[in-house]
Amino acid sequence: MAKSSPIDQRTVALLLACLLSSMLLLGSNATPPTVAISQVPQLEDGMRVEIVGMLVDIWRYESGAESLVLSEFDGGSSVKVLSSKGIRCQPSQYADIGDELHIIGELSKSGLAPTIFAKSDDISVSRESEQYLTVEVLTNCWELFEGDSIRIGGILDLDGFSSSPRLFSFGMNCSVALITGALDFESFLDDRVEITGVLHFDGRTLTLVLMVSSIIRVS
């Protein structure tokens, strides 16, 4: 009976190389850890991470890249994200200020502040602003949204003193003033609505004002 020949060193080396390559490939496809935005400054440079936060600012560059700022729900911490064009369109084509975004990218700490570099393919909307951006958040973190066009839900009612329209939180515990222009707001009184408008801080009266462009009744 013939004996089987021993495996030579070249074959062993080839098998080990294939095994190592497979392990590296599996590692690269592994889901990165989900971290809070407040934890980002403490992480290692080059780490691949997954974050979830509220979009509070966005810029578009001539190169096609986009710069996003994501904040935690309470507005306490924020992080910059640079999005390069992938197969999917860039966030500015579908995301609005106040949306909750889900992002996977690589952390860089080479600049003045930590930045996450991501492909547009790795950015998605988890919740839209009218589901996520509340009147409570808006009044507590208004600096993040001043001058921005936002979409927000609440209850439209009148101010008890001046009888002017205001958007109240669903719990009726806080509100923001509305400038409706020629829009018919009276037919929406006491209703749950979705309002689109630009937020301003009136330094003369020290009040927040939404310059309303549209009002939609929601169930």
Image: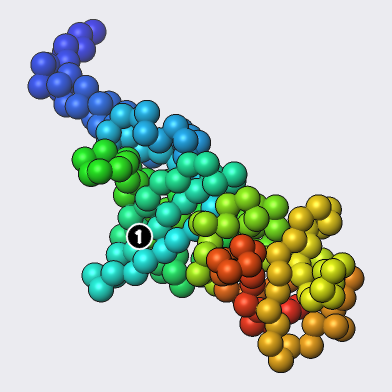
> Could you say which quadrant of the image residue 209 lies in?
bottom right
Depth check, front residue: 191 or 140: 140
Identify the residue at horizontal 27%, vertical 26% (top origin): 19
Identify the residue at horizontal 47%, vertical 51% (top origin): 70
> Could you say which quadrant of the image residue 10 lies in?
top left
Q: In the rendering, at what x and y percent does residue 14 appear?
A: 16, 26
Question: Identity of the amino acid at label 1?
Answer: Ser
In the visual, does 190 lie left or right of 153?
right
Picture quarter with the C terminus: bottom right
Picture quarter with the N terminus: top left
Q: Specify the color scheme.
A: rainbow
Residue lying furthest right in this view? 190
Residue 164 visible to the viewer: yes
In the visual, does 79 lie left or right of 161?
left
Depth check, front residue: 120 or 17: 120
Q: In the rendering, at what x and y percent does residue 6 appear?
A: 16, 11
Q: In the rendering, at what x and y percent does residue 96 appear?
A: 54, 67
Depth check, front residue: 145 or 59: 145
User: Which residue carries the number 1 mark?
Assistant: 67
Identify the residue at horizontal 85%, vertical 69% (top origin): 161
Depth check, front residue: 11 or 207: 207
Q: In the rendering, at what x and y percent does residue 101 appear?
A: 52, 54
Which secondary structure lies at badge 1? strand
Q: How many marks?
A: 1
Give above or below for 174 relative to 46. Answer: below
Residue lying furthest bottom in this view? 182
Give above or below for 24 relative to 216. Answer: above
Identify the residue at horizontal 70%, vertical 82% (top origin): 180
Q: Which class describes the residues within 10 Å of circle 1: few (<14), some (14-19), or many (20+)?
A: some
Residue 132 visible to the viewer: no
